[in-house]
Image (cartoon, rainbow, N blue to C red):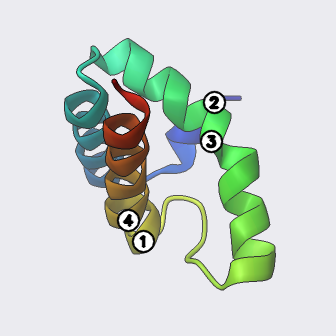
C-alpha cells in the first residue's frame, strides 16, 4: 500500500510539485522523499501538535521546511 494514495489527489499533486521544486528533482524523487518522511511527520503529530499526515500543514509547511533544509545544507 502506498501511503501517498491516502492523500487527496489535489493535495498529492500540490505537495509533490512543491517538494520537486524545492529539491530540484522529478516527481518520482519527490514522492520518494515524501514516503520516507511519513514516520517523522507522524512523530511530530504525536508530540509537536502538527497536522495529520497529508493535512494542510503537511502540504504547506513540510515542503517549506524541506526547502529550508536543502538551502542550509547546500554549500
Q: CA distance from mark 2 to mark 3?
A: 13 Å
Camera-side residue: 10 or 22?
Answer: 22
> Residue 30, located in which quarter of the rendered image?
top left
Q: CA distance from mark 4 to mark 3?
A: 13 Å
Q: Give the numbered dot on residue 57.
A: 1
> Residue 36, located in which quarter of the rendered image?
top right
Q: Earlier in the sequence, mark 2 or mark 1?
A: 2
Q: Dot 1: what SS?
A: helix
Q: Earlier in the sequence, mark 4 or mark 3?
A: 3
- Mark 3 lies on residue: 37
Residue 65 on image: x %, y %: 41, 55
* Residue 67 position (above or below residue 64): above
- Mark 4 lies on residue: 61
- Quick check: marks 4 and 3 in contact, CB under 8 Å? no
Graded by Cα atoms within 10 Å as few (under 14), some (14 to 19) or many (20 or more), the crowding at tag 1 reads: few
Q: Earlier in the sequence, mark 1 or mark 3?
A: 3
Q: Dot 3: what SS?
A: helix
Count of numbered circles in the view:
4
Amino acid at each position: 500500500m502506498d501511503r501517498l494514495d491516502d492523500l487527496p489527489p489535489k493535495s498529492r499533486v500540490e505537495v509533490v510539485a512543491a517538494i520537486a521544486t524545492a529539491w530540484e528533482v522529478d516527481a518520482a524523487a519527490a514522492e520518494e522523499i515524501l514516503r520516507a518522511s511519513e514516520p517523522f511527520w507522524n512523530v511530530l503529530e504525536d508530540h509537536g501538535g502538527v497536522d495529520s499526515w497529508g493535512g494542510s500543514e503537511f502540504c504547506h509547511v513540510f515542503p517549506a521546511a524541506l526547502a529550508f533544509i536543502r538551502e542550509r545544507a547546500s554549500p
